[in-house]
Image (cartoon, rainbow, N blue to C red):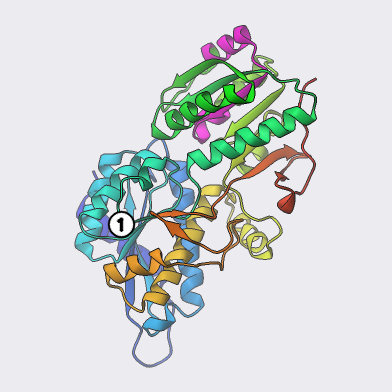
Amino acid sequence: MTTRRHFMSQSAAAASALAFPLVAGAQPKTIKVGVLHPVTGALAYSGQQCREGALMAIEDINKAGGIKSLGGARIEALLGDAQSQPQAGVAEVEKMNEAGVCAVVGAFASAICLATTQAAAKYNLPHIVDVGVADQIVERGLKNTFRFAPGYKKVAETAISNLHVLNTAAGKPAKTVMIIHEESLFGSGTAQLLARELPGFGYEVKEIVKHANPTRDFNNIVLRMKAVNPDIVIPANYYNEYALLVRTMQQQKVTPKAIYSVLGGAASSYKFLKEFPEAANGIIDCNHWFNPKDPRAQALKKRVEAKGLYFSYELFLTYSAMWLLADALERAKSTDRAAIIDSLEKSTFANHFMPYGPTKFVNGQNQGAQPLMVQVLDKDIKVIIPREYRQADPLFPLKA
């Protein structure tokens, strides 16, 4: 368990890293914001990517003059580690509340977000959910909770609808599906939605396989896949397990007509593409993605890559979530928690590079949030649907 002393030393280090020299005169006050992610444990890679996105946003916000309606006040990050466990995330929220943060941004995983938003609600502490896709997060009536990105119901509906369009256009070669999902709230919830909706579009769900986090061997699951022989494999899992599953499929020469991911942990990943280009080739994914035609997204991508990092959905979603908070602070003209919540409820935030349009929250969910369909083509990740953002025509099926 992270100690209070370690937590505060992390926070001090972050504040020092984000401090910029000012000319003579009174320094603007700082605004404490909790940045909470699983930077250790099974979800460490994703958590670290989220944290980097938050810190890059804070750097940009402060360089642009801070919160101008508060005299140029600069945002100071108080870092917390959820250790890939909901209870650890709750403990960090308690520490952040004691430290006087005005809001929390986090905490990546659905199960962690479910716990941290509830913990923050006890203190009327605004909590912006950066990734967590489980719709239960915003269905409990918590007034402090706001999610900028789409939930898994929206993503699953979009994925199924687009699968049907692709399959119909190709002459309906795909008729059977196998779903492989991780065991937590994210994977189980996504799998349940898919299993319920797919038959209505004419697909037979031949098998649903759940796996633990972490899982270090997919040989038995892929052997089962060989026996079932589905036309389409739909994975819904985090990065490590997704990458290992697809690599095991490649090693065992299992080649369905499509690997059609729904919130695939490695499907829309430049890291996976670089490390395993052959395994990644042709994968389709319905996931969080930026507007590829927005120059701000491309500029941030270059900055991230210059740091030796990957421009992943974790990073750019948390970057966007921090800017959403900065916009709310600007309009609230206050660090009062109730004022920030009111500002978020009325948000029309549109200064972002996500394909969402102006922000509008209803019961804590951004109504314009939508996923994009992407596919690995020509050693790159390309948007294939919708046409408004299309960079390449889809290749479906991958195997005749």
Instruction: Indicate the position of residue 273 as horizontal and vertical percent values.
Output: 66, 38
28 vs 372, left or right, is left
321 vs 224, left or right, is left
Disc 1: CA contacts within 10 A as few (<14), some (14-19) or many (>=20): some
- Magenta region, residue range: 220-243
Q: Secondary structure at mark 1?
A: loop
**Looking at the image, which residue is at 39% across and 65% down?**
344
Please tell me whether residue 24 is drawn above or below residue 287 in the rendered image: below
Q: Is residue 2 visible?
A: no
| Kind of residue at badge 1 | Lys
Q: Closest to the observer: 188 or 264? A: 188
Q: Is residue 255 magenta?
A: no
**Looking at the image, which residue is at 42% across and 67% down?**
346
171 vs 139, left or right, is right
Mark 1, residue position? 143
In the image, farthest residue toward the front: 200
Instruction: Indicate the position of residue 42 as horizontal and vertical percent values.
Output: 40, 35
In the image, farthest residue toward the bottom: 25
Q: Closest to the observer: 59 or 153? A: 153
Please tell me whether residue 144 is drawn above or below residue 196 in the rendered image: below
Instruction: Indicate the position of residue 11 as horizontal and vertical percent values.
Output: 31, 62
Dividing the picture into quarters, in which one does residue 76 lie? bottom left
Quarter of the image for the N terminus: give it.
top left
